[in-house]
Amino acid sequence: MSKWNVYVTRLLPKPAMDLLMKHCNVEVNQEDRVLTRQELLRQVKGRDAIISLLTDTIDSKLMDSAKGIKIIANYAVGFNNIDIEAATERGICITNTPDVLTDATAELAWALLLATARRVVEADNYLRAGKFKGWGPQLLLGHSVKGKTLGIIGTGRIGQEFARMAEGFKMDILYYDIQPNLEFERETSAKYVNLDELLTRCDYISLHVPLTPKTQHLIGPRELKLMKNTAVLINTSRGPVIDEGALVKALLDKEIWGAGLDVFENEPELAPGLADLDNVVILPHIASATIEARTDMGLVAVKNILAAMENKLPPNCLNPEAFNRQKI
Ligand code: DGY
Protein backbone atom coordinates (compact mmCIF):
# COMPACT_ATOMS: atom_id res chain seq x y z
CA MET A 1 0.00 0.00 0.00
CA SER A 2 1.43 3.41 -0.87
CA LYS A 3 2.04 5.77 2.02
CA TRP A 4 -0.51 8.50 2.59
CA ASN A 5 0.46 12.13 2.43
CA VAL A 6 -0.61 13.73 5.72
CA TYR A 7 -0.48 17.36 6.87
CA VAL A 8 -0.49 18.22 10.59
CA THR A 9 -1.48 21.81 11.37
CA ARG A 10 0.58 22.04 14.59
CA LEU A 11 3.30 19.87 16.08
CA LEU A 12 1.78 17.15 18.30
CA PRO A 13 3.39 15.16 21.15
CA LYS A 14 6.26 12.95 19.99
CA PRO A 15 4.66 9.49 20.38
CA ALA A 16 1.86 10.57 18.03
CA MET A 17 4.24 12.13 15.50
CA ASP A 18 6.47 9.04 15.61
CA LEU A 19 3.57 6.70 14.95
CA LEU A 20 2.29 8.85 12.09
CA MET A 21 5.74 9.18 10.51
CA LYS A 22 6.25 5.43 10.67
CA HIS A 23 3.29 4.86 8.37
CA CYS A 24 2.81 8.05 6.36
CA ASN A 25 4.63 10.84 4.56
CA VAL A 26 4.13 13.68 6.98
CA GLU A 27 4.47 17.42 6.78
CA VAL A 28 3.94 19.56 9.88
CA ASN A 29 3.41 23.27 10.45
CA GLN A 30 6.83 24.23 11.83
CA GLU A 31 5.65 27.51 13.34
CA ASP A 32 4.52 27.53 16.94
CA ARG A 33 1.32 29.32 16.01
CA VAL A 34 -2.03 28.79 14.34
CA LEU A 35 -1.79 28.85 10.54
CA THR A 36 -3.41 31.76 8.75
CA ARG A 37 -6.39 30.96 6.56
CA GLN A 38 -4.27 31.40 3.40
CA GLU A 39 -1.54 29.11 4.73
CA LEU A 40 -4.09 26.47 5.67
CA LEU A 41 -5.78 26.63 2.26
CA ARG A 42 -2.38 26.20 0.61
CA GLN A 43 -1.16 23.40 2.84
CA VAL A 44 -4.17 21.11 2.55
CA LYS A 45 -3.84 20.78 -1.23
CA GLY A 46 -2.96 17.31 -2.47
CA ARG A 47 -3.17 15.62 0.95
CA ASP A 48 -4.83 12.31 1.77
CA ALA A 49 -5.42 13.30 5.37
CA ILE A 50 -5.02 16.22 7.77
CA ILE A 51 -4.78 16.45 11.53
CA SER A 52 -6.50 19.72 12.40
CA LEU A 53 -6.90 21.72 15.59
CA LEU A 54 -9.94 23.38 17.10
CA THR A 55 -8.42 26.69 15.95
CA ASP A 56 -8.56 25.64 12.27
CA THR A 57 -11.79 26.49 10.46
CA ILE A 58 -12.61 23.52 8.27
CA ASP A 59 -15.42 24.67 5.99
CA SER A 60 -16.60 23.77 2.50
CA LYS A 61 -14.12 26.14 0.84
CA LEU A 62 -11.23 24.49 2.62
CA MET A 63 -12.52 21.02 1.77
CA ASP A 64 -12.77 22.03 -1.89
CA SER A 65 -9.14 23.11 -1.94
CA ALA A 66 -8.22 19.77 -0.34
CA LYS A 67 -9.56 17.75 -3.28
CA GLY A 68 -8.98 14.02 -2.83
CA ILE A 69 -8.70 14.25 0.95
CA LYS A 70 -10.22 11.26 2.70
CA ILE A 71 -10.12 12.07 6.38
CA ILE A 72 -9.74 15.07 8.67
CA ALA A 73 -8.79 13.98 12.18
CA ASN A 74 -9.55 16.81 14.61
CA TYR A 75 -7.19 16.92 17.58
CA ALA A 76 -10.02 17.72 20.03
CA VAL A 77 -13.23 16.20 21.28
CA GLY A 78 -15.16 19.30 20.20
CA PHE A 79 -15.70 19.72 16.46
CA ASN A 80 -17.59 23.00 16.14
CA ASN A 81 -14.70 24.20 13.92
CA ILE A 82 -15.74 21.71 11.23
CA ASP A 83 -18.71 21.75 8.87
CA ILE A 84 -19.63 18.08 9.21
CA GLU A 85 -22.49 18.29 6.72
CA ALA A 86 -20.18 19.70 4.04
CA ALA A 87 -17.68 16.94 4.80
CA THR A 88 -20.32 14.24 4.51
CA GLU A 89 -21.51 15.64 1.18
CA ARG A 90 -17.93 15.39 -0.07
CA GLY A 91 -17.32 11.92 1.38
CA ILE A 92 -14.70 13.20 3.83
CA CYS A 93 -14.55 11.34 7.10
CA ILE A 94 -14.26 13.51 10.24
CA THR A 95 -12.96 12.14 13.52
CA ASN A 96 -12.42 13.55 17.01
CA THR A 97 -10.61 12.47 20.19
CA PRO A 98 -13.19 11.58 22.86
CA ASP A 99 -12.60 9.74 26.17
CA VAL A 100 -8.86 10.33 26.53
CA LEU A 101 -9.36 13.91 27.74
CA THR A 102 -12.43 13.35 29.90
CA ASP A 103 -10.57 13.09 33.23
CA ALA A 104 -8.21 15.98 32.46
CA THR A 105 -11.10 18.28 31.55
CA ALA A 106 -13.25 17.31 34.53
CA GLU A 107 -10.23 17.81 36.82
CA LEU A 108 -9.65 21.29 35.46
CA ALA A 109 -13.32 22.19 35.91
CA TRP A 110 -12.85 21.25 39.57
CA ALA A 111 -9.64 23.25 39.77
CA LEU A 112 -11.54 26.29 38.49
CA LEU A 113 -14.45 25.71 40.84
CA LEU A 114 -12.24 25.47 43.93
CA ALA A 115 -9.96 28.29 42.82
CA THR A 116 -12.92 30.60 42.25
CA ALA A 117 -14.81 29.64 45.41
CA ARG A 118 -11.72 30.05 47.59
CA ARG A 119 -10.17 33.00 45.69
CA VAL A 120 -6.94 31.08 45.17
CA VAL A 121 -5.53 33.20 42.35
CA GLU A 122 -6.51 36.47 43.97
CA ALA A 123 -4.88 35.34 47.24
CA ASP A 124 -1.72 34.26 45.45
CA ASN A 125 -1.49 37.67 43.70
CA TYR A 126 -2.13 39.43 47.02
CA LEU A 127 0.74 37.62 48.69
CA ARG A 128 3.16 38.11 45.79
CA ALA A 129 2.31 41.83 45.77
CA GLY A 130 3.63 42.04 49.34
CA LYS A 131 0.20 42.82 50.82
CA PHE A 132 0.17 39.94 53.33
CA LYS A 133 0.84 41.42 56.77
CA GLY A 134 -0.31 38.43 58.82
CA TRP A 135 -3.37 36.25 59.43
CA GLY A 136 -6.70 38.06 59.61
CA PRO A 137 -10.21 36.86 60.45
CA GLN A 138 -11.73 38.62 57.43
CA LEU A 139 -8.90 38.10 54.99
CA LEU A 140 -9.96 36.88 51.53
CA LEU A 141 -13.08 35.03 52.60
CA GLY A 142 -14.54 32.69 50.00
CA HIS A 143 -17.44 30.25 49.91
CA SER A 144 -17.44 26.65 51.11
CA VAL A 145 -18.10 23.90 48.63
CA LYS A 146 -18.99 20.84 50.70
CA GLY A 147 -22.71 20.20 51.05
CA LYS A 148 -23.68 22.89 48.53
CA THR A 149 -25.83 22.39 45.43
CA LEU A 150 -23.98 21.65 42.22
CA GLY A 151 -25.54 22.20 38.80
CA ILE A 152 -24.27 20.43 35.72
CA ILE A 153 -25.40 21.59 32.30
CA GLY A 154 -24.61 18.89 29.76
CA THR A 155 -24.07 15.34 30.93
CA GLY A 156 -21.93 13.81 28.23
CA ARG A 157 -18.72 12.06 29.21
CA ILE A 158 -17.09 15.11 30.81
CA GLY A 159 -20.18 16.35 32.65
CA GLN A 160 -20.72 12.87 34.08
CA GLU A 161 -17.11 12.53 35.20
CA PHE A 162 -17.26 15.98 36.79
CA ALA A 163 -20.30 14.76 38.77
CA ARG A 164 -18.52 11.57 39.88
CA MET A 165 -15.61 13.66 41.16
CA ALA A 166 -18.07 15.60 43.37
CA GLU A 167 -18.63 12.56 45.57
CA GLY A 168 -16.28 13.60 48.37
CA PHE A 169 -17.92 17.02 48.58
CA LYS A 170 -21.30 15.48 49.44
CA MET A 171 -23.17 17.91 47.22
CA ASP A 172 -26.75 17.79 45.98
CA ILE A 173 -26.45 17.51 42.22
CA LEU A 174 -28.97 18.93 39.76
CA TYR A 175 -28.49 18.52 36.05
CA TYR A 176 -29.96 19.73 32.81
CA ASP A 177 -29.58 18.25 29.34
CA ILE A 178 -31.77 17.74 26.30
CA GLN A 179 -33.11 14.62 27.99
CA PRO A 180 -32.79 12.87 31.36
CA ASN A 181 -30.18 10.15 31.81
CA LEU A 182 -31.53 7.58 34.27
CA GLU A 183 -28.33 5.58 34.57
CA PHE A 184 -26.43 8.76 35.47
CA GLU A 185 -29.12 9.58 38.05
CA ARG A 186 -28.79 6.13 39.65
CA GLU A 187 -25.01 6.39 39.80
CA THR A 188 -24.71 9.92 41.19
CA SER A 189 -28.13 10.66 42.77
CA ALA A 190 -28.29 13.68 40.45
CA LYS A 191 -31.79 15.07 39.79
CA TYR A 192 -32.99 16.23 36.40
CA VAL A 193 -34.47 19.76 36.37
CA ASN A 194 -35.18 22.36 33.73
CA LEU A 195 -32.56 25.00 33.02
CA ASP A 196 -34.26 27.82 34.93
CA GLU A 197 -34.68 25.68 38.04
CA LEU A 198 -31.03 24.66 37.91
CA LEU A 199 -29.89 28.26 37.55
CA THR A 200 -32.09 29.41 40.41
CA ARG A 201 -31.18 26.69 42.89
CA CYS A 202 -27.49 25.95 42.39
CA ASP A 203 -24.47 27.38 44.20
CA TYR A 204 -22.00 26.11 41.60
CA ILE A 205 -22.86 25.66 37.93
CA SER A 206 -20.57 23.98 35.43
CA LEU A 207 -21.07 23.94 31.65
CA HIS A 208 -20.29 20.79 29.67
CA VAL A 209 -22.25 21.18 26.45
CA PRO A 210 -20.94 21.13 22.88
CA LEU A 211 -21.18 24.40 20.96
CA THR A 212 -24.12 24.25 18.55
CA PRO A 213 -26.57 26.90 17.32
CA LYS A 214 -28.82 25.81 20.23
CA THR A 215 -26.17 26.21 22.94
CA GLN A 216 -24.70 29.49 21.67
CA HIS A 217 -25.40 32.09 24.42
CA LEU A 218 -27.23 29.47 26.45
CA ILE A 219 -26.15 31.64 29.37
CA GLY A 220 -27.09 35.25 28.67
CA PRO A 221 -28.36 38.23 30.71
CA ARG A 222 -31.65 36.53 31.62
CA GLU A 223 -29.96 33.34 32.81
CA LEU A 224 -27.34 35.25 34.80
CA LYS A 225 -30.13 37.18 36.54
CA LEU A 226 -31.77 33.91 37.56
CA MET A 227 -28.61 32.75 39.33
CA LYS A 228 -28.02 33.36 43.05
CA ASN A 229 -25.79 36.32 43.82
CA THR A 230 -23.52 33.88 45.64
CA ALA A 231 -23.29 31.54 42.62
CA VAL A 232 -20.13 30.56 40.79
CA LEU A 233 -20.20 29.73 37.06
CA ILE A 234 -17.60 27.42 35.51
CA ASN A 235 -16.98 26.99 31.79
CA THR A 236 -14.61 24.43 30.27
CA SER A 237 -16.78 23.75 27.20
CA ARG A 238 -16.74 26.47 24.53
CA GLY A 239 -16.65 30.22 25.08
CA PRO A 240 -19.69 31.21 22.99
CA VAL A 241 -21.95 29.14 25.27
CA ILE A 242 -21.81 32.22 27.53
CA ASP A 243 -22.60 35.76 26.41
CA GLU A 244 -19.26 37.05 27.71
CA GLY A 245 -20.23 40.74 27.65
CA ALA A 246 -23.29 39.92 29.77
CA LEU A 247 -21.11 37.90 32.13
CA VAL A 248 -18.73 40.81 32.69
CA LYS A 249 -21.71 43.01 33.54
CA ALA A 250 -23.20 40.40 35.89
CA LEU A 251 -19.85 40.06 37.69
CA LEU A 252 -19.45 43.82 37.97
CA ASP A 253 -23.01 44.25 39.23
CA LYS A 254 -22.47 41.34 41.68
CA GLU A 255 -25.42 39.46 40.19
CA ILE A 256 -23.26 36.36 40.60
CA TRP A 257 -20.30 35.86 42.88
CA GLY A 258 -17.63 34.59 40.54
CA ALA A 259 -16.69 32.70 37.40
CA GLY A 260 -13.97 30.25 36.44
CA LEU A 261 -13.35 30.22 32.69
CA ASP A 262 -11.06 28.15 30.49
CA VAL A 263 -12.70 29.21 27.23
CA PHE A 264 -13.77 32.54 25.75
CA GLU A 265 -16.21 33.81 23.22
CA ASN A 266 -13.59 35.23 20.83
CA GLU A 267 -10.49 33.31 21.77
CA PRO A 268 -7.76 34.37 22.29
CA GLU A 269 -9.40 37.78 22.89
CA LEU A 270 -11.24 38.45 26.14
CA ALA A 271 -14.37 40.57 26.52
CA PRO A 272 -13.48 44.14 27.60
CA GLY A 273 -13.18 44.35 31.37
CA LEU A 274 -13.05 40.61 32.04
CA ALA A 275 -9.36 40.49 32.94
CA ASP A 276 -9.75 43.46 35.31
CA LEU A 277 -12.13 41.59 37.59
CA ASP A 278 -10.94 39.95 40.80
CA ASN A 279 -13.87 37.56 40.95
CA VAL A 280 -12.87 35.55 37.88
CA VAL A 281 -10.25 32.92 37.33
CA ILE A 282 -9.26 32.84 33.66
CA LEU A 283 -7.15 30.18 31.98
CA PRO A 284 -5.88 29.91 28.39
CA HIS A 285 -7.97 26.91 27.22
CA ILE A 286 -5.89 24.27 29.00
CA ALA A 287 -8.55 21.83 30.24
CA SER A 288 -7.07 18.89 28.31
CA ALA A 289 -3.49 20.08 28.81
CA THR A 290 -1.96 17.16 30.67
CA ILE A 291 0.95 15.29 29.15
CA GLU A 292 -1.11 12.11 29.30
CA ALA A 293 -4.25 13.49 27.68
CA ARG A 294 -2.48 15.43 24.94
CA THR A 295 -0.33 12.42 24.05
CA ASP A 296 -3.34 10.13 23.92
CA MET A 297 -5.30 12.67 21.86
CA GLY A 298 -2.47 12.58 19.32
CA LEU A 299 -2.41 8.80 19.26
CA VAL A 300 -6.19 8.65 18.82
CA ALA A 301 -6.04 11.12 15.90
CA VAL A 302 -3.25 9.12 14.23
CA LYS A 303 -5.01 5.78 14.74
CA ASN A 304 -8.10 7.16 13.06
CA ILE A 305 -6.00 8.06 10.02
CA LEU A 306 -4.29 4.67 9.99
CA ALA A 307 -7.67 2.90 10.10
CA ALA A 308 -8.89 4.98 7.14
CA MET A 309 -5.68 4.14 5.29
CA GLU A 310 -6.49 0.45 5.73
CA ASN A 311 -9.97 1.10 4.43
CA LYS A 312 -11.51 0.46 7.85
CA LEU A 313 -14.09 2.69 9.51
CA PRO A 314 -12.04 4.99 11.80
CA PRO A 315 -13.04 4.30 15.43
CA ASN A 316 -14.03 7.90 16.11
CA CYS A 317 -15.68 8.69 12.79
CA LEU A 318 -18.39 11.31 13.36
CA ASN A 319 -19.99 10.85 9.94
CA PRO A 320 -19.86 7.16 8.95
CA GLU A 321 -22.04 8.02 5.91
CA ALA A 322 -19.01 9.79 4.46
CA PHE A 323 -16.90 6.68 4.90
CA ASN A 324 -19.55 4.55 3.19
CA ARG A 325 -19.67 7.03 0.30
CA GLN A 326 -15.92 6.60 -0.19
CA LYS A 327 -16.53 2.89 -0.73
CA ILE A 328 -19.16 3.32 -3.47
C1 DGY B 1 -11.43 19.80 23.02
O1 DGY B 1 -10.86 18.72 22.90
O2 DGY B 1 -12.47 20.06 22.44
C2 DGY B 1 -10.81 20.79 23.96
O3 DGY B 1 -11.39 22.02 23.93
C3 DGY B 1 -9.31 20.89 23.76
O4 DGY B 1 -8.78 19.72 24.16
Image (cartoon, rainbow, N blue to C red):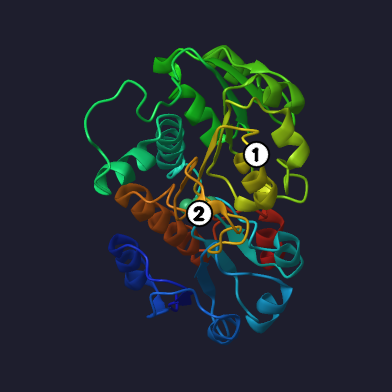
Q: Quadrant of residue 17?
A: bottom left
- Residue at 34 percent across and 54 percent down: it is 295
- Which residue lies under the disc numbered 1? 253
- Residue at 44 percent across and 19 percent down: it is 144
Disc 1 marks which amino acid?
Answer: Asp
Picture layout, residue 139 above or below residue 29:
above
Question: Are there few (<14), some (14-19), or many (20+) residues within 10 Å of tag 2?
Answer: few
Quadrant, the N terminus: bottom left
- Which residue lies under the disc numbered 2? 275
Please name whichever residue, 238 or 53, is drawn nearer the observer in this view of the structure.
238
Looking at the picture, how far across and down is residue 303, in whole percent? 43, 58
Looking at the picture, how far across and down is residue 53, in whole percent? 51, 64
- Residue at 67 percent across and 55 percent down: it is 319
Q: Is residue 211 visible?
A: no
Q: Left or right: 35 with respect to 224?
A: left
Disc 2 marks which amino acid?
Answer: Ala
Asked if the residue at label 1 sits under 8 Å from ligand 1, the reply is no
